[in-house]
Amino acid sequence: MRKSFLSIFTFVIVAMIQLCIACFAIETSPSTINFDDILKLAIEKSYDLKISDYDVFIAKQGIRTARSEYFPKINASAGTEYTKNFKDLQNSTVSVVGEAFVNPYTRFQSLMGITLTYNVFDFGVRRGKLDMAKEDVLLKELLEKEQLQELKLTIIDTYCKLFITKKQLEINESILDLARKNLEYKTKLFEAKEISKTELNDQAIEVQKYEKRILELKSLAQESLNWLAFYTGVEYSLESLKVKEFKETDFNPMEFNDYTKSLTWQIQEKELKKKELSLKVAKRANLPKLNAYSRYYLYGSDHSSYKDTMSDFGPSNYTIGATLYVPVFDGFKNSAEIKTAYLELQQQLIKRDKAIAQFMNRLATMRSNLVYLDEQIETDEKLTKELKDKENSIRRLLDKKVATPIEFNETRIQLLEHQIELEKNLATTIAISKAIQALTTH
């Protein structure tokens, strides 16, 4: 009885484990995928988008850094020392130079001070740095959108390749079945001495050709699946996977013509604005700066005892003043910085023009491909109609025993091979339209 109970218990545990494994397999290996779900998963998983998020956060800290220049700076300092002077002067006074104290006689002494400084006026240098920091945040946000845009384009391309390859794989498997049937028919005909050995060999070569093509397509499909697994974090099984077609949209890929509304233009303009502000700051860096300051000192000293120095510790002096800092000669450093900023600005103008030219060329290439594919599809559909008519004709002849099954299968193979091209062009057309939509909207 006890052994029976243990056996049942063991069976239940094993069944539960197998059920959990099956559930996990279903979760990580979906049987059907579609583009929208893949894109959503890729956006959630994207390493580049997460990195871009941190770029924005880091840039926002740059604004805080630039704004800190508008606040007064408070520094505290403290020090203690023992001075042994070989020529003590009894009537000497304590001298303070900056934050240091000088005594011309032997004694213990301690000093603590608090200094407040404030940048009163610097001809807009700190304002320029703050504006640069703000522009940098806006730039990083645009670059994050660009990362999302590129991710969409990558997923569109990868998903399209997978869909086409999977469709080609399915059709080629159907073709292989027909080729194998023809091989069986021709083998019987050869054994009946109605066809030559060469004809039989040709058919066997056809079968091997399709077998090889299927292996190549499986390799290509698995490569696309590996990339999708990288982008989404989900593993996919090629054998049981069904890839849904793209959903068509009402988007018109030929409407967009204003490149100044593109993300590329906006990014380049932000880069240009940063260079202009950098030049502005460089030009004002050597202008006079007015700073206000205030210091408060506590001082204590004794000739022979550190402890007594602490007892003597108390307010010493208070200072308030202003400093006008005027650079006279810096070895032409600022001149070089101004020239560098100016050259970078001119360089950015060229970079902007190049980026826009590349964007428009990319868009024009996509559109020309669409025009070509539309013409191809129109031709493919006409040819498909003719091949279907031929298939129906051969079917009727086959029913009347006028045509052979081999001829019918060869017609079917011809139709399926053309269907591969048609399916490829249809999927590529929708994919390119989606790519243009991703490229021109943000």
Image (cartoon, rainbow, N blue to C red):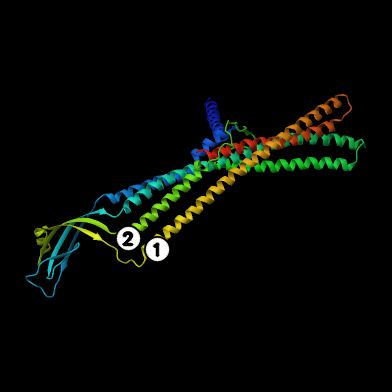
> Which residue is label 1 attached to?
336
Mark 1: give few (<14), some (14-19) or many (20+) Cα within 10 Å: few
> Which residue is label 2 attached to?
286
Residue 364 vs residue 190, the one in the foreground: 364
Residue 47 seen in this snapshot: no
* Residue that extends furthest to the right in the rendered view of this protein: 193
Do residues under tags 2 and 1 come within 8 Å of each other at their CB atoms?
no
What is the secondary structure assignment of the residue under circle 1?
Answer: helix
In which image quadrant can residue 286 be found? bottom left
Q: Say left or right for 394 vs 320.
A: right
**Residue 348 x, y percent position in the rendering:** 47, 53
Residue at 78% x, 29% y is 388
Q: Say left or right for 323 vs 318.
A: right
What is the secondary structure assignment of the residue under circle 2?
Answer: loop
In which image quadrant can residue 409 be found? top right
Residue 134 seen in this snapshot: yes
Number of marks in the image?
2
**Residue 235 x, y percent position in the rendering:** 57, 38
* Residue that extends furthest to the left in the rendered view of this protein: 91
Residue 143 vs residue 121, the one in the foreground: 121
Hey, what amino acid is under mark 1? Ala
Ranked by sequence position, the earlier of labels 2 and 1 is 2
Residue at 61% x, 42% y is 366
